Amino acid sequence: MLHAKLMEYKVLLTILAFIFVLVNCDESSVKPSFRAASRTINGTKSCPGCNTRSRYSRTRCCGRAVSDYFQNDQFEKMFSNRNSLEAQAKGFWDYHSFVTASALFQPYGFGTTYINWNFMGTKEIAAFLAHVGTKTSCGHKVATKEQLAWGLCYNKEMNSNSDYCDGHYKNAYPCAPGVAYYGRGALPIYWNYNYGEAGKDLKVDLLNHPEYIEQNSTLAFQVAIWRWMKPIKEHQPSAHDVFIGYWTPTKNDTLAKRVSGFGATMNVLYGDLVCGKGDNESMNNIISHYLYYLDLMGVGREEAGPHDVLSCAKQVVFNPSYSSFP
Ligand SMILES: *[C@@H]1O[C@H](CO)[C@@H](O)[C@H](O)[C@H]1NC(C)=O
Ligand SMILES: *[C@@H]1O[C@H](CO)[C@@H](O)[C@H](O)[C@H]1NC(C)=O
Ligand SMILES: *[C@@H]1O[C@H](CO)[C@@H](O)[C@H](O)[C@H]1NC(C)=O
Ligand SMILES: *[C@@H]1O[C@H](CO)[C@@H](O)[C@H](O)[C@H]1NC(C)=O
């Protein structure tokens, strides 16, 4: 009698365990009922939701938040010198603003995407922050050692002598009088059209108030994640897409040696400023930041993949010299 009861419990437990496995993308804690909002930030597709087959059947997306696996102490280690005397943006950047900014893009897969049941989020955050760390570093100026620990020194381009107002876009994105659209943010954006587009998507009037970005670190991270998530041009993949592999290379891409991975994110964001030039120092500096951050996030640099995927040394660029990323 007791035995039969125990058997019943066992069966029940097995069924429950099975259900648990079904709703979990891996062993770690995942909120099972996540569904992405159906709206889209223009050009960026929202996630299909956890355990829902999308038309991109390789993609699965779960409701794990960036703050579940990326903690304040990791952020502090990555950007340990950002509040030093040498840092122009001393006191500006913090973990909380990054996590708040990330939350806006999590429904679109930022830091939350699974591909073939592999969680891509941790690596994606390391990759995204590698670009941030490199672009905002003052390591080359002040550091004799620990060159990689000087990210987030800046929140804007210094000593700019251009207003970055492109007259071609004067109808869609008219330049406001007396302001300049120089590089601002964690992954700096430049030019009136980028401020205009980012402002439209984020619902902040950046065209008339570009200075908001240097006054608000959440916004400064949002603009950066926007740049990461949004293709530079229509019908092109975003840095996010090429990093997680939410992108099918065409025959042309293959001929151009463009493959999914970290190398292609540099191709999307900087084009021929760093890619297709062989073993370029600027490129290697970005890769070094990525490897260093992978270590600090506990993933380990050995998970970064082969050099061909990490590098863009031999890739033909998506967009030949455009001036928005000096
Ligand atoms: C997306 O872009 C279209 C066309 O440019 C525009 O009409 C629409 O309002 C935009 N949607 C959002 C949410 O910005
Ligand atoms: C900073 O920007 C965020 C995101 O746009 C916004 O929610 C917040 O209200 C802003 N903070 C201030 C003090 O303006
Ligand atoms: C592929 O490349 C060729 C030669 O550069 C070009 O003419 C063609 O339009 C490209 N096709 C696509 C789909 O981009
Ligand atoms: C890398 O490319 C940049 C931009 O073209 C250039 O200034 C730099 O000299 C290059 N470095 C190497 C080692 O080729």
Image (cartoon, rainbow, N blue to C red):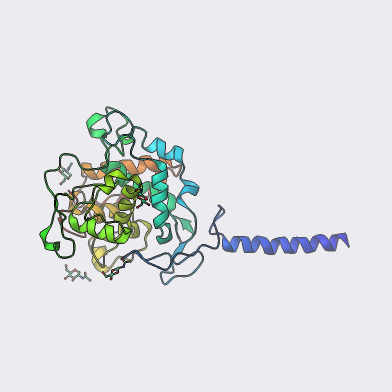
- Tell me the quarter of the image containing the N terminus: bottom right
Position in image of residue 184 (x %, y %): 24, 47
Q: Nearer the viewer, residue 46 or 156?
A: 156
- Say if residue 216 shows up in the picture: yes
Q: Is residue 166 left or right of residue 313?
A: left
Instruction: Give the quarter of the image for residue 260.
Output: bottom left
- Does 81 sit above or below residue 175? above
Among all residues in the image, which is located at the extreme bottom? Answer: 55
Q: Nearer the viewer, residue 238 or 302?
A: 238
Q: Is residue 254 left or right of residue 10?
A: left
- Does 255 sit above or below residue 293? below
Position in image of residue 80 (x %, y %): 37, 33
Q: Is residue 267 left or right of residue 77?
A: left
Position in image of residue 236 (x %, y %): 26, 64
- Say if residue 262 shows up in the picture: no
Q: Residue at x 44, y 45 (%)?
A: 299
Among all residues in the image, which is located at the extreme right? Answer: 1
Q: Residue at x 40, y 35 (%)?
A: 77
Position in image of residue 234 (x %, y %): 25, 66
Q: Residue at x 33, y 39 (%)?
A: 92
